[in-house]
């Protein structure tokens, strides 16, 4: 794993150092950052890194962070995404207050400024097709070729641009380009497109516009309008910075933001591209954007991941200038650590096996005390019912156990957590020879789980009363991709066919069934689980957030 733990541990990173220096030198009296999502999909954990950085810096340095929707491409944008993005930023624990903006708020001003560029000889209308523009742009080693329309007069450019705006021309027939340098070593400076014709309905501006600004044109100017001091983006925009600065330099903008680039978050076994995530949803590989296997914020939330675990993860990985891939085990480690601290303990039997305690009186029910959290007495306790008929986990019993198997087997004594010692006396099988029931005896003197004569047992098992427990469906998830570095180009081939196992016969204790907490609980010896929104009064559904096993903690030397 390659992470910038050195900077993370210091609680500092190169961007915070720059911000601190700019405040100390009075270059800025107050800092303003922004998180600028395109509303064309749900947010994922990579966005969480950007959110935590932008909002975190504003919080730490007493500044402001805007939420700005970069809504310049109406063909892919939807209100559903705008709503989900706001919900997800709040869920992560951040707030923009009154500072909610849309790039579309600035369309009028951006248009006026584009006219200004034309008048100053810095922009022209190009009639070439998209394909012609692409091929004449050149390559990394060859310069581009000037467009035959590059030297149009200012008047002709103004007239055409105005008519583009008025909706006179079909999609794709003309663009407005900046007039910079077709031979520039930086391809982004080879007369980049500023406006394209798009007859599309916009969620906010309706049918008012037939032309829409490009990302490069809209983004920096929106930053300038909002007085952003530090415009943080990911590394792939490093080569766009000269264009960002060229535009700020040529336009009468009210402020001059500076762009800083950081590494994007990549995770093993995970793809964080909106294109791929959209396709996973559209092609039905997952149940939706909030499928608990998705790396989206909505998916993490539905899976029962606490927002504090995501924040801790982002803090631990730090902010680096070089791209790297973070082991998904690091995220899982943070989830376990947070849930181990906070999750209430409960008992559930995922794959039940019936147990009849032959020497326990029929019809008798006892209420036993069970604690809710071993390290937090304030979490209190609850009662669980014990009776003659119980369920234990199928794999806690073996008829012919190997040497090291200490759980239940014929003749072997074990402890039922919070209850009694029991011993298996015989096994009941069906016609197919499968074990369907165990006959056991209990020792009434071991109530509470300890023998007065001091004898020991080697295993303590979870269990539930057959009569008092409730049926449930439990969805056990593992990685969506089987390949540690899935191929974004052909991701279907890398999908894990076993990423979801549905257990339909599970049993849960009444405290689980009755509770309606949005927080994950620990099902003892099994992992962390959270109630799913698919639950109905007749059918409870739980998602496994994560198992208890903590192999990753050993690797990184954390605590288990
Ligand atoms: P994708 O590449 O997944 O389609 P995007 O970058 O186009 O995502 P935006 O909505 O434009 O998505 O992203 C909003 C902000 O989140 C941008 O500032 C972008 O740099 C940042 N961001 C997106 N993905 C990551 C990532 N994996 N790690 C860190 N920041 C990210
Ligand atoms: Mg983007």
Image: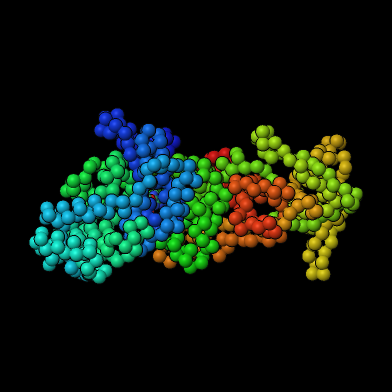
Residue 31 vs 3, above or below: the answer is: above
Q: How is the image coloured?
A: rainbow
Displayed quadrant of residue 342: top right
Name the spot of residue 522 as percent of width and height, x first: 65, 46
Q: Quadrant of residue 457?
A: top right
Q: Is residue 515 above or below residue 160?
A: above
User: Does residue 524 show up?
Assistant: no
Choose between 189 and 410: the one closer to the eye: 189
Q: Position of residue 244 (x, y in %)?
A: 24, 49
Residue sitting nearer the eye, 90 or 310: 90
- Please state the horizontal and vertical placement of residue 372, each as a whole percent of the image: 69, 40
Judging depth in this view, the residue of 480 and 373 nearest the camera is: 373
| Nearer-the-camera pick, 11 or 215 | 215
Q: Is residue 109 visible?
A: yes
| Residue shown at 29% from the left, 32% from the top | 29
* Residue plotted at (73% across, 49% down): 510
Question: How far across and how far down the image is residue 253, in percent?
Answer: 21, 45
Task: Identify the residue at image location x=48%, y=51%.
Answer: 297
Number of labels in the image equals 0
Residue at 20 percent of width and 52 percent of height: 113
Instruction: Locate the C terminus and report the quarter of the image it occupies.
Output: top right
């Amino acid at each position: 794993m390659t992470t910038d733990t050195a900077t993370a541990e210091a609680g500092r990173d190169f961007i915070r150092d720059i911000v601190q220096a700019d405040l100390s030198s009075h270059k800025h009296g107050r800092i303003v950052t922004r998180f600028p999502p395109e509303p064309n999909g749900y947010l994922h954990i990579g966005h969480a890194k950007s959110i935590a950085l932008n909002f975190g810096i504003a919080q730490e340095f007493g500044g402001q962070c805007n939420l700005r929707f970069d809504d310049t491409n109406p063909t892919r944008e939807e209100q559903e995404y705008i709503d989900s993005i706001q919900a997800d930023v709040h869920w992560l624990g951040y707030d923009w207050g009154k500072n909610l903006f849309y790039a579309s708020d600035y369309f009028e001003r951006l248009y006026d400024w584009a006219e200004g560029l034309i008048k100053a000889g810095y922009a022209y209308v190009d009639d070439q097709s998209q394909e012609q523009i692409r091929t004449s742009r050149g390559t990394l080693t060859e310069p581009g070729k000037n467009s035959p329309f590059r030297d149009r007069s200012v008047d002709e450019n103004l007239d055409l641009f105005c008519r583009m705006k008025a909706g006179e021309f079909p999609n794709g027939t003309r663009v407005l380009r900046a007039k910079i340098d077709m031979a520039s070593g930086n391809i982004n400076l080879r007369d980049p497109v500023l406006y394209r014709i798009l007859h599309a309905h916009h969620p906010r501006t309706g049918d008012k516009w037939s032309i829409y600004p490009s990302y490069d044109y809209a983004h920096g100017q929106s930053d300038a309008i909002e007085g952003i001091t530090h415009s943080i983006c990911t590394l792939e925009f490093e080569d766009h910075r000269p264009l960002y600065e060229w535009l700020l330099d040529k336009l009468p903008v009210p402020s001059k933001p500076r762009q800083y680039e950081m590494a994007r978050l990549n995770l093993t076994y995970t793809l964080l591209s909106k294109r791929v995530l959209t396709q996973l949803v559209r092609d039905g590989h997952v149940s939706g954007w909030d499928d608990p296997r998705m790396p989206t914020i909505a998916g993490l939330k539905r899976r029962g991941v606490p927002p504090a675990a995501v924040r801790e993860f982002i803090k631990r990985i730090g902010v680096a200038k070089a791209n790297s891939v973070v082991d998904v085990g690091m995220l899982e480690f943070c989830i376990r650590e947070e849930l181990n601290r906070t999750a209430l303990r409960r008992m559930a039997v995922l794959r039940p096996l019936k147990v009849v305690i032959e020497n326990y009186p029929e019809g008798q029910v006892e209420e036993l005390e069970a604690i809710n959290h071993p390290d937090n007495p304030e979490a209190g306790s609850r009662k669980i019912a014990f009776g003659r008929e119980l369920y234990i986990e199928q794999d806690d019993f073996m008829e012919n156990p190997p040497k090291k198997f200490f759980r239940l087997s014929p003749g072997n004594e074990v402890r039922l957590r919070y209850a009694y010692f029991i011993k298996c006396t015989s096994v009941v099988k069906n016609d197919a020879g499968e074990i369907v029931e165990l006959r056991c005896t209990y020792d009434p003197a071991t109530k509470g789980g300890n023998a007065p004569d001091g004898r020991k047992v080697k295993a303590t098992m979870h269990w539930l009363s057959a009569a008092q427990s409730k049926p449930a469906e439990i969805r056990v998830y593992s990685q969506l991709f089987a390949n540690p570095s899935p191929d974004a180009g052909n991701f279907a081939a890398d999908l894990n066919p076993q990423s979801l196992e549905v257990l339909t016969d599970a049993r849960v204790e009444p405290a689980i069934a009755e509770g309606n907490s949005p927080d994950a609980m620990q099902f003892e010896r099994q992992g962390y689980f959270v109630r799913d929104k698919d639950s109905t009064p007749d059918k409870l559904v739980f998602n496994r957030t994560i198992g208890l096993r903590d192999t990753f903690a050993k690797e990184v030397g954390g605590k288990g």
